[in-house]
Amino acid sequence: MSSAPVKRTPYFKILVANRGEIALRIMRTARRLGYGVVAVYSDADRDALHVREADQAVRIGEALPAQSYLRIDAIIGAAKASGAGAVHPGYGFLAENEDFAQGCRDAGLVFIGPSPEAIRAMGNKAGAKDIMQKAGVPVVPGYQGADQSDAVMLAEARKIGFPVMIKAVAGGGGRGMRLVADAAAFSDALRSARSEAQGAFGDPTVILERAIVDPRHIEIQVFGDRYGNAIHLGERDCSVQRRHQKLIEEAPSPKVTPELRARMGAVAVAAVKSIGYEGAGTLEFLLDEGGEFYFMEMNTRLQVEHPVTEAITGLDLVELQLRIAAGEPLGLRQDDVKFSGHAIEVRLCSEDADHDFMPQSGRMALWQMPDGVRVEHALQSGSEIPPFYDSMIAKIISHGADRNEARGRLICGLEQVAAFGVTTNQGFLISCLRHPGFAKGEATTAFIGNHRDELLAPRADGKAKAALAALLLYVTNPHAPPWRGGRSLAATFPLTTRIDLGHGVHEVDILRERDGGYVASLEGGEHRFGIDELGRDTIRFRTDGVMASAKFLRDGDRLYILHRGATIAVRDLTLAAPVSAAAAGGDGKVRAAMNGRVVAVLVKPGEQVAPGQPVMTLEAMKMEHVHTAGVAGTVSAIDVAEGEQVTTGRIVVEIAAGA
């Protein structure tokens, strides 16, 4: 350890310049160490949990909530107004913004993170690659020049050779990133990446890299202090991704040997020492099948997936950040870092995996998290999921003596998650964890793409789910006679129920028999049930000789059921009018598929369009989604403007069919 004199920068209150689960995570450690905590919030977050849990909270934004957390002047002003002496940026938003770090320094605030100079050196993808190349670290071949013109970018992409990867130079979390297969698709991908990067980071600059086929995504966690000490805390495997955003992370990696860990760790430590790095950081690498690794970028902040490192090292990474920022020496040598067991984290997201991972927003009617695993979240029953931020709503982390134990505990934990009211990727995550390829530790960044059909395959018990849903609608109907166990004096007449489980409409006949049992008939088959107990939110029943239980919530014409780890969202259509072709765009009107912001209008009035042709791009939860024409015809009207915020179902483009 360094013998340099200690230079303290004490503080007593911390402003957390972020929101949601990471804000609460930072507050928890800060309070344990005796610090006061201050929250900031946009108008959309006025009633959020991180606001209510803080000692103080300061409003920083109004009309565009996502942009509120990017307002450097407002956040520094909030720190001054609240008496905070330090600012923790969390991750995302301004966490890797050198101007923010410099602004805190100029205002006399301690920035809990690296110096502005280190952020400038390593937070920019192009600059970081230059530093690594000079240090002899292998990097992915590419282009990171200042000339960002369309013609130069296309020419450089051709030199690199397709497929190429477009990456936002200030990016993170997969935003501003596009994989481009050929030159024909390059221009549209470049525009989209720039637009997303500008919206997420305020900087449209991008770099190009050769696409390495089916690699592992491996990152090394590092820490440095102001006295020249630096260590690594091993690796995390973040290969399971969709849209270049991580869904499952684990430590250690099933692919990394102790020898490879030592090599990659030594490279990472040497790199941060060379720039006098202070605080938490992560160096990200691509690992190919032959065991060669290539530097991609450095994240000069805490990572979303830091809990898996905490689980196997026993260290609190936020505590290390706070102590280093206060001027304490790191206090750890590399030999002091010990690894124990295996940890896996999944990101529970408000998105519909069955519909291209479309972001979902709305009210979470019931929110109950499992016991026995670590959960990081900032929600409760009744919370609103706004459309302005990232779709991740919780992180669930398990730790076990080995990988299989950790995987099993995580599956059990996910099966207990009750998230009713907003569609999540709960079932998809369970499918990933159960997949033989993941179980064997074979997942690369191509895992979801290669196994998408298997992972999204509807369960074989679809009819059984429909029967159970219809039964619950029947017995919980507020106008139905109260359920009583035992025999009935007479059998009832069959009652037909029309239900939508999100994959088509089912008609189910429910009949109560004299013995007290129920028969659900649909599509030529019968399902018999016996109910042993019916509570306010749980049912215990028997079917096919097996007793089971389910949790449920009745919310108007909606019914939510958690059964055998699957959340079933049911809509009662018994009294609903038939759905017209208009809802599917067959009337020539293109409707917004979700709440979002218009980032690109791709057609003009009078233009001829074909079915499936892109006409509008909306951004929701930091992801872009292209809307297409439902019919062939002529664009008769554009009903929105770029930059406008729209709600689900709003007409955005009108097409005169066949005109």
Image: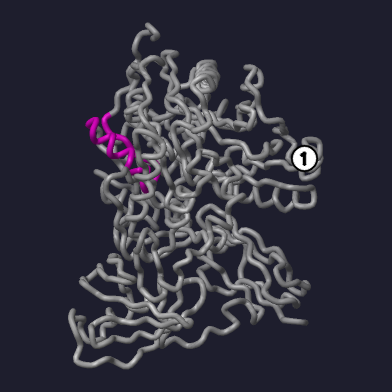
State the residue lying farthest toward the front.
545
Q: How many marks?
A: 1
Q: Looking at the figure, which quarter contains the C terminus?
A: bottom right
Q: Residue at x 44, y 86 (%)?
A: 576
Q: Residue at x 73, y 69 (%)?
A: 604
Where is residue 387? Give x, y as percent.
47, 59
Residue 250: quarter of image: top left
In the image, taking residue 170 as reference, residue 568 lies left or right, namely left
Residue 71's place in the image compared with 548, above or below, is: above
Observer able to see residue 93: no
State the residue lying farthest toward the top.
3
Where is residue 57? Give x, y as percent.
30, 47
The amino acid at mark 1 is Ala
Q: How is the image coloured?
A: one colour
In the foreground, 105 or 643: 643
Q: Which residue is mark 1?
A: 157
Residue 404: quarter of image: top left
Q: Residue at x 77, y 72 (%)?
A: 607
Where is residue 169? Give x, y as percent.
62, 37
Q: Secondary structure at mark 1?
A: helix
Where is residue 215? Give x, y as percent.
62, 36
The stretch drawn in magenta includes residue 510: no
Q: Looking at the figure, which quarter contains the N terminus?
A: top left
In the image, taking residue 159 as reference, residue 309 lies left or right, namely left
- Which residues, given as a range, are shown in magenta? 12-34
Residue 595's place in the image compared with 30, above or below, is: below
Q: Residue at x 60, y 42 (%)?
A: 203
**Mark 1 nearby-residue class (10 Å; few <14, some 14–19, many ≥20):** many
In the image, taking residue 143 as reference, residue 170 lies left or right, namely left
In the foreground, 386 or 165: 165
The stretch drawn in magenta includes residue 21: yes
